[in-house]
Image: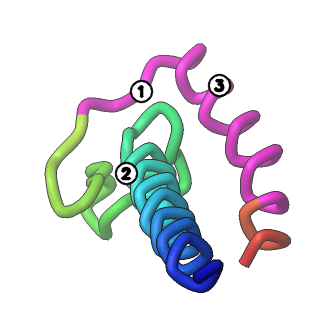
Amino acid sequence: MILVPALISLGLGIIISLIIMLMGHLLLMIPPIGGWAIHVTSGGQERFMGQRQEKPTAAGEVVLREMDRKVRPALAAAV
């Protein structure tokens, strides 16, 4: 009898954790947060997920660099 509620709560826990992980993954795709996903092509144009982006301002570059420096080691440790 106790098996049914246990399986239900386990299933709900798995579903909720998958939703949270998906939201975190989508958050990393936002350019100001996921700065490491931006790469410079051979022509010097910055691209994010294949789309042409405006050049960031000097202040924006500093923010991206700081985020990259702080987030990349944490992300590598999490994986």
- How far, Cα to Cα, is label 1 from label 2? 21 Å
Residue occupying image coordinates x 47% and y 32%: 32
Sequence-wise first label, 3 or 2: 2
For mark 3, does the 10 Å Cα neighbourhood hold few (<14), some (14 to 19), or many (20 or more) residues? Answer: some
User: Looking at this view, is 35 or 54 the one in front?
Assistant: 35
Residue occupying image coordinates x 65% and y 25%: 63
Residue occupying image coordinates x 51% and y 80%: 4
The quadrant of the image that shows the C terminus is: bottom right
- Residue under pointer 1: 56
- Residue under pointer 3: 63
Secondary element at tag 3: helix
Residue lying furthest left: 51
Q: Is residue 29 left or right of residue 73?
A: left
Q: Nearer the viewer, mark 3 or mark 2?
A: 2
- Residue under pointer 2: 26
Q: Is residue 73 magenta?
A: yes
Q: Main secondary structure of the magenta part?
A: helix
Sequence-wise first label, 1 or 2: 2
Secondary element at tag 2: helix
